[in-house]
Image: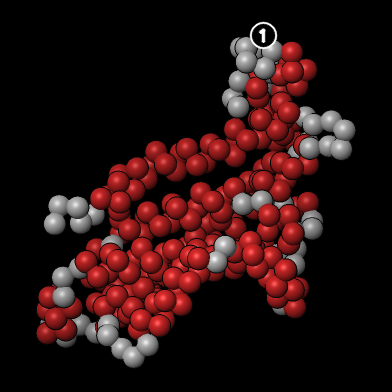
Amino acid sequence: MVLNSLRPTSEIFTAPLGLPASPTLRSYGRVWTEASFGAYLLNSLVVTCGAVLLGTAVSALAAYPLARYDFAGNRVLGAYFLAGLMLPIRLGLVPIFYLMDSMGLIDSLLGLTLLYAASGVPFCVFVLSAFYRSLPGELDEAARLDGAGEFRIFGQIMLPLVRPALASVMLFQFVPLWHEFLYPLVLLRSDERFTIPRGLSQFFGEYTTDWSALFAGLVLATAPLFVLFVLATRQIIAGMTAGMSK
């Protein structure tokens, strides 16, 4: 992908597996200027980051009582959240489209953000509930004896203890949402609101495809994910291996 972004499309077809004869960054400049890649990048950041933060916040609040409290309907409500893992969101394409249209959220970054946030809730609730259940019950009892309220116990004691799990679920939400193409294709109409996958699709023509510019756009789209994985590696490992020593 990187090598093909450094040479013209004609050379990609003549020597697809060779090194670039004359490496050039011309395709990157064309992607950034002619394709408005900066606007696509900003839209993707707004939608993906907003969806991840909103979905994780809702999931953290939902998973805590499901894991730490025994109340009527606990199992039913937990099964309801888990049902979202068994139903792919793409199966709801038509009803979701009509729902968004009735709410005036077609061609809206807000509508796409809300949709993405809701799609990540079942997975986050499933993971965070397991982490909340692994915390000792003595923590709740000691905090209540000291006069702490339920919201304080959640915010100052429980939530910091599941920070590795929060980092893990945020990352596992970010990656698929960053590359999501179907719903931006269906819900977005204006070029200035396109996300990166939707914007890069414009390089596919009916008769020709600018492969060099497309590869350059893919490299630019992958760079934020690479940086994110490098920065969050420690939290990811901590979240995935928590409890293995017990």
Quadrant for the C terminus in the image: bottom left
Q: Where is residue 122 in the image (x, y as percent from the top left)?
A: 46, 68
Residue at point 68%, 70% (across, down) = 96
State the residue in front, 87 or 133.
87
Residue at point 84%, 30% (across, down) = 208
Quadrant for the N terminus in the image: top right
Residue 163 found in image quarter: bottom left
Res. 193 visible in picture: no
Q: Residue furthest bottom?
A: 72
Q: What residue type is labelled 1?
A: Ala
State the residue in front, 238 or 70.
70
Viewed as shown, does residue 208 lie left or right of 244?
Answer: right
Q: Which residue lies furthest to the right in this view?
A: 207
Residue 150 found in image quarter: bottom left
Q: Position of residue 199 (x, y in %)?
A: 72, 45
Viewed as shown, does residue 152 lie left or right of 189?
Answer: left
How many other residues sit within 10 Å of disc 1, few (<14), some (14-19) or many (≥20)?
few
State the residue in front, 236 or 153.
236
Res. 148 visible in picture: yes
Count of marks, rendered view = 1
Judging by the rendered image, the residue that carries numbered circle 1 is 21
Residue at point 62%, 15% (across, down) = 17
Decide: is 27 above or below 95: above
Residue at point 51%, 49% (across, down) = 175
SS category of the residue bearing label 1: loop
Q: Where is residue 11 in the image (x, y as percent from the top left)?
A: 73, 15
Q: Position of residue 180 (x, y in %)?
A: 61, 52
